[in-house]
Amino acid sequence: MSGAVTGGKRLGVQHHDGDWFTSYSPRASNAYAEGQWDQWVDLAIKILRDPLTAITRPEAHELAQQLEPKNFYDECGRELAEAEIEARFTRKLAT
């Protein structure tokens, strides 16, 4: 999809209609965007650095100029350990 902002081989966002955007998988050509955490960070940086962000959120666009996306295709930075993921996404029930 031309015009898609991508953060990995299966992770991106594309223009849908009007002022609306949807997830996009460049590799699979569907809406099921997926990737490692670092690829999502890369996508976020690219969205924040995009000229459209300068229009809608100029302060975020300005701050993002200090960040560089990696522009990797199928690699990421340090992979997260299962324990790190569990610590972030598992809620402990109060007893």
Image: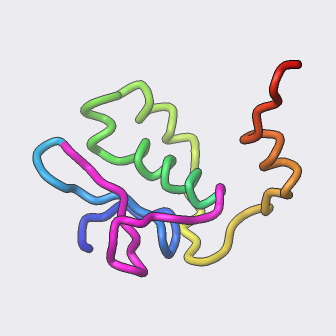
Q: Residue furthest front?
A: 95
Q: Nearer the viewer, residue 61 or 15?
A: 15
Q: Residue furthest left?
A: 18
- Write down the region rendered in magenta: 20-37
| Res. 51 image quadrant | top left
Rendered residue at 11%/45% (across/down): 18
Main SS of the magenta segment? Answer: loop
Q: Nearer the viewer, residue 73 or 68?
A: 73
| Residue 24 in the image, given as x and y percentages of width and height | 36, 65
Q: Is residue 88 above or below residue 16?
A: above
| Residue 8 in the image, given as x and y percentages of width and height | 52, 69
Q: In this rendering, would 3 be left or right of 63?
A: left
Q: Nearer the viewer, residue 40 or 34?
A: 34
| Residue 73 in the image, given as x and y percentages of width and height | 55, 76
Q: Is residue 27 highlighted in magenta?
A: yes
| Res. 54 image quadrant | top left
Quadrant assignment for the C terminus:
top right
Q: Is residue 69 above or below residue 52?
A: below
| Residue 66 in the image, given as x and y percentages of width and height | 56, 40
